[in-house]
Amino acid sequence: MKSFHIFLLGVLFCLSLCVQTASAVISFDKSFYSPLNSKRPLRKSTSLIVLHTTEAPSKSALQKLSALGECNYCIDEKGRVYLIIDRQREAFHAGRSMWNGRTNVDKFSVGIEVCGYHDKALTTAQFRALADLIAELKHYYKIPDHCIIPHSQVAYATPNRWFTRSHRGRKRCGMMFALPVVRRLLGLKTRPGSDPDVKAGRLIVGDKHLSNVLYGTVQIPRSVVAAAVAAQKKPPAAPNKKGKQDVAPPPADNKKSPPGKKTSPAPPPAVPPPIAVASAEVDAIRRNEGNVIGKNHSAWDIARNAYNNEHTVYTFPDGTKKCGHQIVDFKSIPVGTKVEVNVSDENLPDTYQIIGINGTAEDIAGEETLSFQTIYVCPDGHYFRGSQLNQQSLKKLRYNTKVLTGYSVGGPVTVKRTPTDICGAQWRAKDTFYLINNRLVPGNQVDEKKIPSGTMIFYRS
Ligand SMILES: [Zn+2]
């Protein structure tokens, strides 16, 4: 088995050489060239290349990166390289950052965004394009391999609810670029051996998993590697079939079959494709993560500094959703809550407040706490108007009771009384809620053919 490993490393090395030497002159797409270029200062020095993952598909990422001037280059899923901010100018890509005692890494680095996720394999085209771009920049700026590092390696956070000191681990952005197997694909031979700022006591480790990826070794079961390699040895999908091919196709077999001999199935390629191995290793870094809150797996562990962001969505075990910025008490989030980061605007949940998550009834409804138009929907599906409650019964409202302020109650829906009869055009509004199976279903998500008879509707008055 050991010899297999050595063989694999050899192959990776050869292939990484191929990737490097095959680099052609890179043509840059300027269709997302940032309008902020003229406003960005020239860097006085360049000693780092910082690699990012957009954590969003190229369609939305490119627009944002360009509008805010947040990187020098961006590589989309097809391997197209976009010039966003001229390479000699400062791009605002690293945010709160420090490396070897120097803060504000934007001032001395080039920032490259790759459209993809920190824990998912990139496309072959992206690996190739990134290798080419790195080779060119390395040559131009004379930057050594260990100074080409992921964003997560330089980002840091100030004290927060989880840490009393400034700490590494604000983000996991680009962390796959620290994996030796991925670095070999990018033509990089070395990486930093330890965190200089943690070593010097300037920061503490705030994310052990990240630290393990950056400086330790990620163990992947050999069976996973073998399976990944085997999967890639399969011939490419038949031409007319749909299906993405993210992995390198096996080398083309140009030799013609000797005359007279039957054409046998193509032999397996002589070398196992390295991208498959990289994919397996990248997958391995995800195994410790998961996006469900557990006893020892907090919102911070999952979402990092996006934990209280408006584009981070928490889906509670009962199916209700909240955005990060709507949550007051992160300790009260129940185990089993799913956390999604970078949710696009159209998929964001609609807003009502929740007792326990957003505070007490008074915190949420203020002077309207006992109002006729404040509706409390309990986890068991019972609901009350504020006017039916008093200070004592308010205190008895359970954790996870939803609070709607400024609402009317309509219903019930019957065969003769449709949602339109009850609340007119508002029946389809996203801030109109149907109480179905103890859940509040927004009007824009309700299936009009499946609204049970007897359903109550809460709509803005
Ligand atoms: Zn980043």
Image: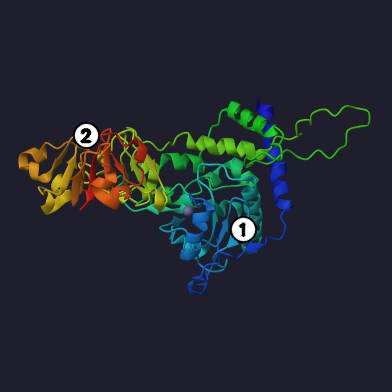
Q: Is residue 296 left or right of residue 182?
A: left
Give how far apart the Cα atoms at labels 1 and 2 are. 53 Å
Which residue is at the far front? 416
Which residue is at the far right? 260
Observer-nearest of 351 and 422: 422
Amino acid at circle 2: Gly
- Secondary structure under tag 1 reads strand
Q: Residue at x 62, y 28 (%)?
A: 227
Would you place residue 134 above or below residue 89 in this image? Answer: above
Residue under circle 2? 381
The answer to whether residue 205 is visible is no
Observer-nearest of 209 and 387: 387
> Pointer 1: residues within 10 angstroms few (<14), some, or many (20+)?
many
Q: Residue at x 46, y 58 (%)?
A: 94
Amino acid at circle 1: Val
Q: Is mark 2 within 8 Å of ligand 1?
A: no
The image's colour scheme reads rainbow
Q: Pick the quarter of the image with the N terminus.
A: top right
User: Is there CB contact under 8 Å for labels 1 and 2?
Assistant: no
Residue under circle 1? 81
Q: Earlier in the sequence, mark 1 or mark 2?
A: 1
> Pointer 2: residues within 10 angstroms few (<14), some, or many (20+)?
some
Q: Is residue 57 left or right of residue 398?
A: right
